[in-house]
Amino acid sequence: MSVRRSMIIAIPGFLAAGPAFAQFGGLGGLGGSKPAAGGGDVSQQVEDFVKRSAIISALVSRALGRINDAFRSDTDAAAARAERESISKITDPKEKQARTAKLVESESAAAAQLAKSADLEAKMAGLDAKKKQQVAEGLFNFGIGALQAIPLFDNGKAIIQSVVSNPMQALKVEPVKEAVPLLEKVISDSKGTIVTLIKVAKGANIDVKQATATSTPVEEDLTKGG
C-alpha cells in the first residue's frame, strides 16, 4: 500500500476540496520540479525542493506548537511561541531549516506524549473556547502540511535517485537528503499521533475542519497567545 493511500485511509473524513493554498509562500505544483531526464543538472530541482520543504516544515512546526500550547502553562506556551517567532526571523536558510527541524522533533514528541494521555478527552473537553479553537486550527494546519509532504517526499527520493550514477551531481542533492527524513516524520505523525488527536478532539466536540493540500492554513500571530 502506498504512503498516499495509507494516509487517506488513516484520516477518514479529514480530506475535502478547499481554496487555493496562499500562506507560507504557496507550493504551486505540490510535487516540485521533476528530476532532469538523462542525468541533467539538478540544481533547480534541489532549489525548488528546499524552498518547498522549508514551507512545510514551518507550517508543521507551528501547527504542532499550537496544539501543544493549549495544554501548556501560560509561561511555557509563551516561551514556545517566542522560540517559533525567533526561528521565523532567521535569514540564513540552512540555519533556519536546522532550527525548524529540531523544533518539529521536540513538538512532535510532546504531541505524541499528549496523545498517550489516558484522560486526554477530558482535558480537551475542559479547555476554554479559545484553546479548543487553537487545537482545531493546529490539527487543520498539520493536515495541510502532511498532505503536501507526501508528494514532496516522493519528489525528494526521485531527485536523489536521479544522481546515483553521476558523482558530479551527488553533492548538489545533499540538502535534499537532509530534508527528506523530516518529511517522512511528518507523514508518519499524520498516520499516528495526529489521527489519535483528531479522534479525541471530535469526541470532545472540537470541530476540526477538513483539509487538503491546497487548503489555506490559519495563520498564527506569534506575538500573542492563542
Image (cartoon, rainbow, N blue to C red):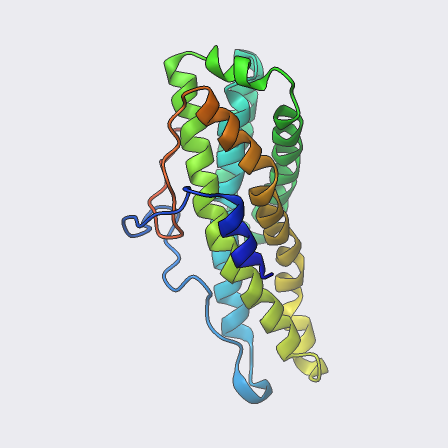
Examine the image and state in which quarter residue 80 appears.
Answer: top right
Q: In this view, does 26 lie to the left or right of 82?
A: left
Observer able to see residue 222:
no
The residue drawn where x is 61% and y is 63% is 176
Residue 53 x/y as whole percent:
52, 55
Q: In this view, does 53 lie to the left or right of 162?
A: left
Count the labels in the image.
0
Q: Which of 1 and 55 is in front in this view?
A: 1
Is 218 situated above or below 114? below
The residue drawn where x is 62% and y is 47% is 188
Residue occupying the far bottom of the picture? 38
The residue drawn where x is 33% and y is 51% is 21
Q: Which of 146 and 104 is in front in this view?
A: 146
On-image quarter of the C terminus: top left
Examine the image and state in which quarter residue 158 appears.
Answer: bottom right
Observer able to see residue 130:
yes
On-image quarter of the N terminus: bottom right
Residue 54 x/y as whole percent:
51, 52
Is 50 situated above or below 61? below
Residue 110 x/y as whole percent:
64, 28
The residue drawn where x is 52% and y is 61% is 152
Residue 187 x/y as whole percent:
58, 49
